Image: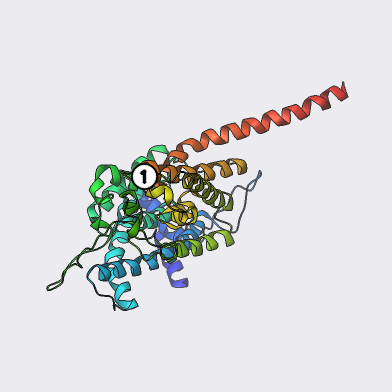
Amino acid sequence: MKPLRKLLTNIKPNFEKGGKLEKFYPAFDAFETFLFVPDHTTASKGAHVRDSIDLKRTMILVVLSLIPCLLFGMWNVGYQHHQALGIIDASLLDNFFFGAIKVLPLVVVSYVAGLSTEFIFAIIRKHTINEGFLVSGMLIPLIMPVDVPLWMVAVSTIFAVIIGKEVFGGTGMNILNPALTARAFLFFAYPTKMSGDEVWINTSLEKGQTLVDGYSGATALGNAAAGLADKIPRTMDAFIGAIPGSIGETSTIACLIGAAILLYTGIGCWRIMSSVFVGGFLMALIFNLFGLNTLMQITPLHHLVLGGFAFGAIFMATDPVSATQTNTGKYIYGFLIGMFAILFRVFNPAYPEGMMLSILFMNVMAPLIDHYIVAANIKRRLKRVKPIQNQNA
């Protein structure tokens, strides 16, 4: 790494004030601080929070926690493709390589479109590159169907960066989760690519290949919303994740591995994660008492492993910017996300997933929750002050 460090040091004056490439300093700074820990510190005077890890390193750890979902998603894309063609003896490598060919272009397009937009805004505003897109760039393709056109991924990513982040001031200022903003844009702008059937499984055919008779590429929740109880995968199958769905959301096991990484490193919020699952479990349990339709009859545990519930609880709801900031508020925030996710699933047959809408709705409500939590704390402490004042008098 020493030769690379020396190279960056030699060309750095060209990007600093007065240099030929001064306008592109944000792009250089982003690349340099991505490779090496910044050599600047906080001010020498005053109280500052100091830690051994900076924002880029935090974002990289989150990306690493998403790798299990990415790898499983690649395998599952190939597995679902071969199953649709009736090829039941495809090897693990055959499934994985086919999936990688389909998934990696989505990841590349997401990062290129998003980072290019970030660079443009950084150059215009003359500030450093926001590191938050390191995570958003990975999340966006993982919550997309495999057959979504690349240009749609680019458009939705650019929309998410501009409308979901930059209009609010960039990373740390957004009120909505950027990745879910991209998915919401795609869902409402191009609904056939997010609520259709075969789009969830790649069905590209080579010469001489045909789809299996009776094949359906609908998701488990899509089948449940249509009342097709016999086509809903078993709880264990859904837990493993070898079912149709978004690229990275189907495997609860992969999500839990990511959760373990986040919790071990202290980055993930266990309060939000646990309360989302509790809220979803209790709401599903209540609906079980009525059982008026197929979705109401699904057991609480089954609900938690279907669709993107686990993925949303672990990677989306815990976004430190758009979530609540108070500890008590995190319990309330997470509980309501889980509750509304199941509620939307049951009563919104046009979009049975529910997790996206639930998290985005609670993103908007998060500041209000924190406001009342802080107000209640202030009121309680003021009550403690009055007896002390009376005693002193």
At 61% from the left edge and 41% from the top edge, which residue is drawn? 328
Number of numbered callouts drawn: 1
Element under disc 1: helix
Viewer-closest of 351 and 2: 351
Viewer-closest of 146 and 130: 146
Instruction: Give the color scheme: rainbow, by chain, secondary structure or one colour.
Output: rainbow
At 27% from the left edge and 65% from the top edge, which residue is drawn? 102
Residue behind mark 1: 181
What is the quadrant of residue 106 in the picture?
Answer: bottom left
Can the viewer see residue 308 in this picture? yes
Q: Position of residue 381 (x, y in %)?
A: 72, 31
What is the quadrant of residue 135 in the picture?
Answer: bottom left
In the image, taking residue 358 as reference, residue 97 lies left or right, namely left
Q: Position of residue 27 (x, y in %)?
A: 38, 54
Quadrant of the image containing the C terminus:
top right
Which amino acid, by three-letter code, is at mark 1? Thr
Q: Position of residue 347 (x, y in %)?
A: 38, 41
Q: How many residues crowd around disc 1 within 10 Å: few (fewer than 14), some, or many (20 or more)?
A: many
Q: Position of residue 46 (x, y in %)?
A: 66, 43
At 52% from the left edge and 35% from the top edge, which residue is drawn? 367
Viewer-closest of 145 and 130: 145
Can the viewer see residue 20 in this picture? no
In the image, taking residue 336 as reference, residue 93 lies left or right, namely left
